[in-house]
Amino acid sequence: MNFKIKRTVLLNALSKVSKAVSLKSPLPVLTGIKFDLQDDQLVLTGSDSDITIQTSIKEDIEIIEKGAVVLSSRYILEIIRKMDSEIVHIYIVDGTLTRIEGSGSKFDLNGTSYIDYPRIDLNKSGVHLEMKSSSLKEAIEQTSFATSEKETRPVLTGVNFKAKNRILECIATDSYRLAKRILPIESDVTFNIIIPKKSLIEISRIIEKDEIIDLYVSDRKVLFVLDIAIIQTRLIDGSYPDTSRLIPNEFDYSMSVDSVSLLNSIDRASLLSNEQSNIIKLTMDEDNVIISSFSQEIGSVEENLSKAFYKGKPLHISFSAKYLNDAIKSIGSEKVKVLFTGEMRPFIIKDLEREDIIQLVLPVRTY
């Protein structure tokens, strides 16, 4: 293996594939990045066996002699990042010992044979779906935060992607809150899968521009094909709970409010709440909307939401400030509507104008 390449181009590619590498992998070779120098391109692959990211470089590279080696993700990334050179020269000196040269710097890095790297099937097979990458990125950001951090119910640690009748539903819940994004799709495909949150976060980070992304869904994995990278992730086994019955269809109370005003009020009310529970209270009637919190040890705070418009009978409801904060931020609109069915019933948060994103929060009992 012997090639010269523009340093920034290589650094950008390494940064992408290294996101799939775990330095704690039980398989030592998977702590590295596979360099596969072919006749017309350099293919870089990173994997932790759950998620695989592969990208190729065809421009700004001079291929001298093809070959392959696996180099430590941690060290090759730092070397390329810190080298003060526009062009770097990388070649195998002996066996797997790889030299990286540029502008007076010379590093010799011990590699691993590419033969030891697991064979990863990145074939484009399964149910095929095309969609805009910006829509996928937005859906990930609007749902993944609501997944569970606890491994006791593995299915809740991922986002449920459910396609049917030209509609794609993305749903996440930790059983205390729920986030749902609905996307129209052109393909009449059907699948019901659970994608791990970690994989979705990495996919979201890699999406840099609005382009068409191809999804290939099979029984155990899903492949995402972008212009600059291929990302494959395992799926979480199991059946996702039916969340449709959790979302109320009728509401007796509603509040519309300026998002920034509500977020700022939540922030101030949280100042004197217990950090662990972070519970705040809404007290509403048609004349006033009061947000408050009380802590036996710290004190209390009360604030009138003058920019809120409430409709319905008087209502008192307590909930996690963090959950409401996350929900409003994920919607990302200037005004939101909050719809209630009762003091101890789940309430939902929506964009004032759109119906394609729903955030649900469960209230808490404070007595």
Image (cartoon, rainbow, N blue to C red):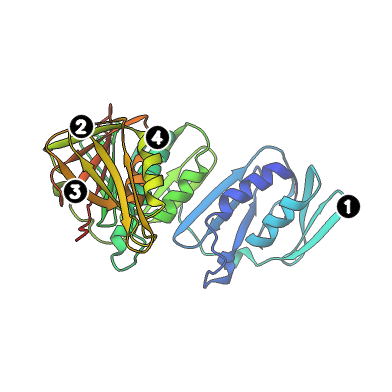
Q: How far is disc 4 from disc 2 in space, using C-alphas?
A: 21 Å
**Mark found first going from the N terminus, 3 or 2:** 2
Q: Residue at x 57, y 66 (%)?
A: 23
Q: Residues within 10 Å of mark 3 (few under 14, many from 20)?
A: many
Q: How far is disc 2 from disc 1 in space, using C-alphas?
A: 74 Å
Mark 4: which secondary structure? helix
Q: Which residue is mark 3?
A: 346
Total marks shown come to 4
Q: Which residue is mark 2?
A: 287
Mark 3: which secondary structure? loop
Q: Quadrant of the N terminus?
A: bottom right
- Residue at the farthest top position: 353
**Mark found first going from the N terminus, 3 or 4:** 4
- Three-letter amino acid code at the position of disc 2: Asp
Q: How far is disc 3 from disc 4 in space, using C-alphas?
A: 23 Å
| Residue situated in front as seen by the camera: 118 or 149 | 149
Q: Which residue is mark 4?
A: 260
